[in-house]
Structures are given as structure tokens and as C-alpha cells.
Amino acid sequence: MFKRNRHGIQIKSPEQLEKMRAAGLVVGRTLDLLKRSVRPGMTPLDLDVIAEKAIRDEGAIPSFKGYQGFPATICASVNDEVVHGIPSDARKLREGDIISIDCGAILEGWHGDSAVTVPVGEVDPKLTELMRITEESMWRGIAALTPGRHLSDIGYEVERYVKSQGRFGIPPEYGGHGIGTEMHMDPWIANHGKPGRGPVLEEGMCLAIEPMVNLGTERTRVLPDEWTVVTIDGKQSAHFEHSVAVTHNGPWVLTALDGGKERLAQLQN
Ligand code: MG
Ligand code: MG
């Protein structure tokens, strides 16, 4: 009942895509609530509590909690933390910080996974620009999700856009992934590279597109907590993610409240 193509990539039926959409909307609504909740003086753990309640209130399960031992519902990565930050109450968010919130949920066995980076109060314009560039690079990658294009076109579009905006670091060892009956499935998706390589995209594939962009070097390290990824130069990093289905009508952004319609229409102009 779970079909895979010859590359081992799960192919969803139209009915299964509707279930992916339902799971995606749980994540989309949760992140929308979190975005509106962020303010100076809160802790990342406060956001985690809000996220877990929102997901469970919808009858879904937080997928990160317990994943390879991860202790929380969200990953909360502040400033120089790139991804996989563990929410804690050790440090309050301060005006001028940026925080990446990554969130996943399971509904009726199907996964959604999405991330946003948001400013805490007023932030330096160069951070606003970093977030804008990272989010836009994600949408450029998403726009490549049409049947007949190649997997590597996604990373090509992400990197091409980021490079067109100036000198930024894209950590090469992190990327997107297939998603469906598990959070992380084949294929792995680079945020850089040449176009026209890898499997051809087919209707029914669901892929999580998630660029990370650093203000400085692309080089990162993992903290002794064995989760938190930070930039080695201490400069800030942004991260955005959506789970997206490939359909004959183009990309269907499962974790965006409007399915991605508005942003994808802008890109076509
Ligand atoms: Mg994620
Ligand atoms: Mg992901």
C-alpha cells in the first residue's frame, strides 16, 4: 500500500496526499501560532510548550519528541545556532535575536515538517535581509518541484538565488529529504549543486525543502549536547522549510496555509 519508485522514493496516491495535507496543516497552523507568540523575555521552552499543546489539541503527535532521543517538540535555534537547537529555559529571547523554529507532527501516520526563522522584536537590517534571502531561496527551490524536472534542480535553484544576493554560507552537509510515512525518507536533497542530475521528479513525491543560510562561513560544528549545530564563526544563520508534494498542477506546499499559492504565483511573474 506504500508505493515506491525504482529509486526507492515513496509515491503517494491522491488520497494519501490529502492525508499529507492534513498533517502539513497541523504543522503550518502550529508554526503560525508560534510566529505570533515570539517576543522578548520568552524562552525557547515556552515556545515548545505552546507547540506541543497545539499539535496534541489537533489530535496529532509531535514527531521530533523522542526522535533519536531528541527531547522536545520543536528545534529552537537562536542566532548562530543553525539547526537542531534544544529548547530550554536557560536563556531568554532578547530584542535583536533571530530564532529558527522547526516543527514536525504526525497525523494518522503521515508526517509534516516545516520551519521558519523569526525576528525577536526589532533586529539588525542585515538579519532581516538574511531571513528574506533564505526564505526566498526556499521558494525558488520549491518552484522547481514539477514533474519531469530533476532532483538536483532544487539545490541548484536554492544556491543560485543565495549567490545572486551576496556572499553567504550554505552548510553543505545539511539538506532536505523525502517525507511521508516517516519524517526522513529518501531522497536526501542538497541545497547546492548542478542542475539536471538525480531522479526525475514524479507526481506523488513529497519532499521537504529546507535551506539554511549563514551570514558568514558555511562551516559549522555540533555542540557537546550532540544536537545543536552552530556556525564556527559565531555569525547568525537562518533556516526555512516546507513539506511539498509534486502534482500535475505544480508544487503543492503541504505545510503552507494557502498551499503555497500566493508565493508561487509571484515567482511566475
Ligand atoms: Mg524540519
Ligand atoms: Mg526536515
Image (cartoon, helix red, strand yellow):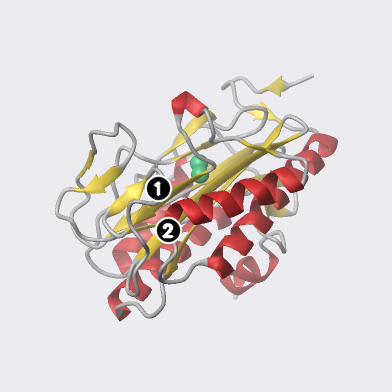
Q: Is residue 74 visible?
A: yes
Displayed quadrant of residue 63: top right
Look at 79% across and 39% down and name the residue there.
19
Which amino acid, mark 2? Thr
Outermost residue on the right side: it is 15
Helix, strand or loop under label 1: loop
Of callouts 2 and 1, the N-terminal one: 2
Name the foreground residue: 94 vs 3: 94
| Contact between labelled residues 1 and 2, with CB atoms less than 8 Å apart | yes
Circle on res. 146: none
Above or below, 186 against 221 in this view is above
Residue 140: percent from left, percent from top: 49, 60
Locate the C terminus and report the quarter of the image it occupies: bottom right
Kindly identify which numbered label has been placed on residue 43: 2
Residue denoted by label 1: 88
In this image, 53 relative to 134: left or right? right
Q: Position of residue 121 (x, y in %)?
A: 41, 77
Label 2 and label 1: CA atoms lie apart by: 7 Å
Amino acid type of the residue tagged 1 in the rendering: Ser
Q: Is residue 125 above or below residue 155?
A: below
Q: Quadrant of the N terminus?
A: top right
Q: How crowded is the residue under tag 1: few (<14 C-alpha within 10 Å), some, or many (20+)? A: some
Task: Tell me what residue is drawn at x 34 percent, y 62 percent.
Answer: 162
Q: Position of residue 123 (x, y in %)?
A: 34, 77
